[in-house]
Image (cartoon, rainbow, N blue to C red):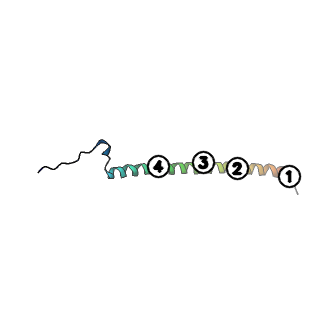
């Protein structure tokens, strides 16, 4: 007796589930790494901006103290 097997069609060719999960894991890893880098860059920029702003406030305070009449 002969067994007849169904042939796979071209649209039925999907990567093995393990491979799909691995690819998805790599993608998520890249995304999370990019988020961490972006976050670190943002914090660095924010830190520099705050440092500059605090310096500017100090300059303005000095100018105000110089112009204020002494008590």
Q: Residues within 10 Å of mark 4 (few under 14, many from 20)?
A: few
Horizontal placement of 70 versus 23: left or right?
right
Residue identified by numbered label 1: 68
Please tell me which residue is depicted at 66% across the width and 51% down the height of the picture.
Answer: 50
| Mark 4 residue element | helix
Residue identified by numbered label 3: 45
Please tell me which residue is depicted at 73% across the width and 51% down the height of the picture.
Answer: 57
Alpha-carbon span between mark 4 and mark 1: 54 Å
Alpha-carbon span between mark 1 and mark 3: 34 Å
Q: Toward the viewer: 28 or 48?
A: 28
Horizontal placement of 24 versus 12: left or right?
right
Q: Residues within 10 Å of mark 3 (few under 14, many from 20)?
A: few
Residue identified by numbered label 4: 31
Alpha-carbon span between mark 4 and mark 3: 21 Å
Location of residue 9 in the rendering, given as x and y in whole percent from the top left corner: 28, 43
Front position among marks 4 and 1: 4
Please report whichever mark, 1 or 2, sits nearer to the chain's N-terminal start.
2
Q: Toward the viewer: 53 or 27?
A: 27
Please report whichever mark, 4 or 3, sits nearer to the chain's N-terminal start.
4
């Amino acid at each position: 007796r002969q067994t007849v097997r169904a042939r796979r069609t071209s649209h039925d060719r999907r990567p093995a589930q393990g491979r799909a999960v691995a690819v998805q894991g790599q993608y998520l890893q890249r995304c999370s790494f990019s988020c961490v880098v972006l976050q670190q860059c943002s914090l660095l920029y924010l830190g520099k901006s705050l440092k500059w702003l605090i310096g500017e406030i100090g300059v303005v305070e000095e100018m105000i103290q110089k112009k204020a009449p002494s008590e």
